[in-house]
Image: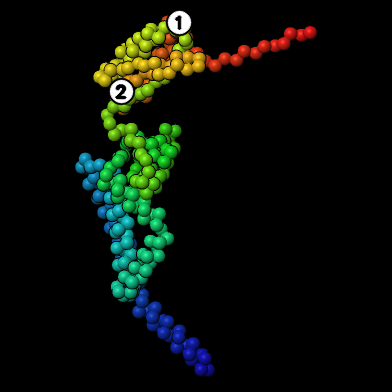
Amino acid sequence: MEQIADLQAHVDKAIDWIWKLLPNLALAIILLIVGLWIIKFLNRMVRKFFERKDYDPTLETFLQSFIRIALKVILFVLVVTQLGVKTSSLVAMIGAAGLAIGLALQGSLANFAGGVLILLFKPFKVGDFISAQGVDGTVKEISIFNTKLNTFGNQLAIIPNGQLSNGNVINYNAENTRRDKFDIGIGYGSNIKKAKDILLAICADRDTILKDPMPEVYVGELADSSVNLTLRFWAKNEDFWAAHFYVVEETKKRFDGAGIEIPFPQRVLHQPEKA
């Protein structure tokens, strides 16, 4: 009988505790729902604000991610406090959890710091074509922890910000113009001056190849089976690849028309005579 009485007492205490908790629990749920809606609304307002103003897309993406995470952390604290957890206990718990999480997620913290450095020093921005960590692509998005690139083949490459901020990055859009280097070999019996004049004429005939600085042609190397010429010319970023492929194709056509040999590897097979 005593055991039944003790069990009944525990059940009564549990029921009383649940009844006391229900109002706070209901308020916490309402606070959570309303808070998530407010966060979503604020994010939408921030996005519209950036759309009206001519701000850097890099700053827009980073701030939206940061604001969203910060507001959710604040909402979590408010909801837990509403459930009756004391603020002092919550702060101590968050501090201990923060230390443990910080030790466990050192890489993520490094990526966050890398994102801040990218935002501050701006080695590249959204829309730039860069080469980093063995990946070439156009910057699609810079978030808090990583940067997304669209590669030439339209694949999505995700690179942690920590590696980007500490590694080598080549930004092909940092300057308005780029210089191309095109190497072509001609036969030893071909006229070097004629070949050089043809290469310069190819550049002169193309409007997208800049005339200042002027294109230049040099004899770069006397190789085993060819005289290697080096053509250097400048073009605007948006015209670079079109100019490059034009020069390659036009060189083959004009060299063939002028009788200038472009050496290529050959193999001669000798078949022994039958006895």
Does the image show residue 184? no
Say whether residue 255 is visible.
yes
Query: Looking at the image, which residue sits at the far bottom?
Result: 1
Query: Label 1 sits on what residue type?
Result: Gly
Residue shown at 54% from the left, 16% from the top? 265
Question: What is the number of the mark on residue 259?
Answer: 1
Q: Distance between the residues labelled 1 and 2?
A: 29 Å
State the image coordinates of residue 255 (x, y, percent, origin top left).
Answer: 43, 9
For label 2, the crowd category at 10 Å Cα-Cα, with few meaning under 14, some 14 to 19 and many 20 or more, is many
Vertical arrangement, residue 187 with respect to residue 72, above or below: above
87, 103: nearer the viewer: 103
Q: In which quarter of the image is residue 234?
A: top left
7 vs 20, left or right, is: right
Q: Which mark is residue 235?
A: 2
Q: In this view, does 133 lie above or below 64?
A: above
Report whether 20 appears left or right of 269.
Answer: left
Task: Choose between 132 and 5: the one closer to the eye.
Answer: 132
The answer to whether residue 98 is left or right of residue 6 is left
Please tell me which residue lies in front, 150 or 237. Answer: 237
What amino acid does circle 2 point to?
Ala
At x 42%, y 38%, the residue is 135
Circle 1: element type:
loop
Q: Position of residue 12 (x, y in %)?
A: 43, 85
- Cβ atoms under marks 1 and 2 closer than 8 Å: no
Could you say which disc has been placed on residue 34 in the image? Answer: none
- Say which element carries label 2: strand
Identify the residue at the far left of this view.
53
**Colour setup of the view:** rainbow
Residue shown at the point (25%, 42%) measured from the top left: 56
Farthest residue in the top direction?
Answer: 258
- From the viewer's perspective, tell me whether residue 104 is left or right of residue 42: right
